[in-house]
Image (tube, helix red, strand yellow):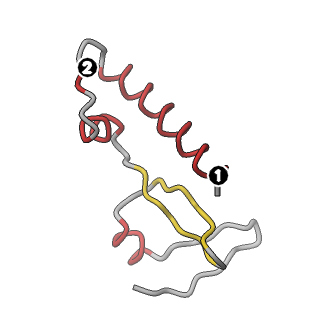
Amino acid sequence: MEKIISFDKQGRLYLPEELRKYLQFKTFIAKTQGNGVYLQPIDEDPLEALSKLGKEKFKSKSINQLKAEARVEIEKNATKKIRRH
């Protein structure tokens, strides 16, 4: 799918509805790649992301505590990845 998009006066990009529905994510890591930008999706549900990694050792913590810890970890890793590129 291709769409022509542009920055607004505040430097924001508007993604058309069709593209947002296609992507099905709300949070991304933006990476420069060659002369372009690559958007890497981040899972919205940190618990689901943890379960995919097999992190069942956290069962003794509350859901809210797990979500908060997972979000911090995801953001920390995302920041590290962005700084490397």
Earlier in the chain: of badge 1 and badge 2, it is 2
In-image side of 76 versus 47 (left or right)? right
Q: Choose mark 1 or mark 2, whichever is in front.
A: 1
Q: Residue 68: x, y in percent? A: 44, 26
Q: Residue at x 30, y 14 (%)?
A: 61
Question: What residue is disc 1 on?
Answer: 84
Q: Residue 73: x, y in percent? A: 48, 32
Is 66 located above or below residue 23 in the figure? Answer: above
Is 66 located above or below residue 36 in the figure? Answer: above
Q: Which of the image's four quarters has the N terminus?
A: bottom left
- Numbered tag placed on residue 55 in the rendering: none
Q: Quadrant of residue 36?
A: bottom right
Q: Residue 9: x, y in percent? A: 76, 72
Which residue appears farthest toward the right when viewing the image?
Answer: 9
In-front residue for pair 48/4: 48
Is 61 located above or below residue 14 in the figure? Answer: above
Q: Quadrant of residue 20?
A: bottom left
Q: Which of the image's four quarters has the C terminus?
A: bottom right
